[in-house]
Image: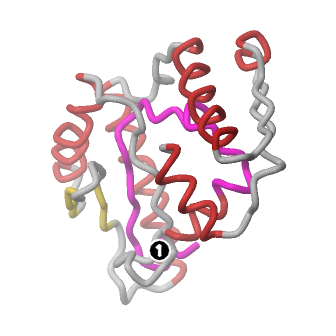
């Protein structure tokens, strides 16, 4: 909603494996609220940048998508954190104009994704993602939170760590995020 009012979208390279970070819905919601703070100049909720080492595909995402979207007529800015910000509607546009411009932008963005093959799901190694999740769980346990981790089999079937013992207050989450790397 804020993104549509601002007429701007934020995108990051493919391959960010949110499950590898081990975030549960409540905690990721709390962390995304930090992106809504006054320090976010566009007012858009910004997804986290990729957590793993960039692949060749991810490194080309910004120049490829920037070029393609600029060719389609959009203003594209490269962000310091590895993403792109695309202006797809003027600030003074009406709601109806923004809706129409957003549809056109979504079509152009989808065409650019397809042109470079980014429309396909990223290749991931479930075992590596599981090990990353276990490392975060181990860190949380070292901080005194009895986190239950899924087995590799459970993880590959969508099982997640049980973080119900982790406090949901923002200060604790931010501190644990720094110390445990999620």
Q: Residue at position x 52%, y 16% from top?
A: 128
Q: Secondary structure at mark 1?
A: helix
**Nearer to us in this view, 3 or 80:** 80
- Residue 145, image x and y in percent? 75, 46
- Residue 111, image x and y in percent? 37, 37
Examine the structure image and report whether residue 53 is included in the region drawn in magenta: no
Examine the structure image and report whether residue 17 is included in the region drawn in magenta: yes
Determine which quarter of the picture holds residue 40: bottom left
Determine which quarter of the picture holds residue 14: top left
Determine which quarter of the picture holds residue 116: top left
- Residue 29, image x and y in percent? 66, 60
Q: Is residue 11 above or below residue 102?
A: above
Q: Is residue 83 above or below residue 57?
A: below
Residue 115 placement, left or right of 135: left
Q: Residue at position x 80%, y 31% from top?
A: 148
**Nearer to us in this view, 182 or 119:** 182
Q: Residue at position x 44%, y 29% from top?
A: 119
Where does the magenta region start and end? Answer: 1-28
User: Colour mode?
Assistant: secondary structure
Q: Residue at position x 29%, y 30% from top?
A: 54
The image shows a total of numbered marks equal to 1
Please name the residue that numbered disc 1 is placed on.
98
Q: Is residue 46 above or below residue 108?
A: below
Q: Residues within 10 Å of mark 1 (few under 14, many from 20)?
A: many
- Residue 133, image x and y in percent? 60, 29
Q: Looking at the figure, which quarter contains the N terminus?
A: bottom right
């Amino acid at each position: 909603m804020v993104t549509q009012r601002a007429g701007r979208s934020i995108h990051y390279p493919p391959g960010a494996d949110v499950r590898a970070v081990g975030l549960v819905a409540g905690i990721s919601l709390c962390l995304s609220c930090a992106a809504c703070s006054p320090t976010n100049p566009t007012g858009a909720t910004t997804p986290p940048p990729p957590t793993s080492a960039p692949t060749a595909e991810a490194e080309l995402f910004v120049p490829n998508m920037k070029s393609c979207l600029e060719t389609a007529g959009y203003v594209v800015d490269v962000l310091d954190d590895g993403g792109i910000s695309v202006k797809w509607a003027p600030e003074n546009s009406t709601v109806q104009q923004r809706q129409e411009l957003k549809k056109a932008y979504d079509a152009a963005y989808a065409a650019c994704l397809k042109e470079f093959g980014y429309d396909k799901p990223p290749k991931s190694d479930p075992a590596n993602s599981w090990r990353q999740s276990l490392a975060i769980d181990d860190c949380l346990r070292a901080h005194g939170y009895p986190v239950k981790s899924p087995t590799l089999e459970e993880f590959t079937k969508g099982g997640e760590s049980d973080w119900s013992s982790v406090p949901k207050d923002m200060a604790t989450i931010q501190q644990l995020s720094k110390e445990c790397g999620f």
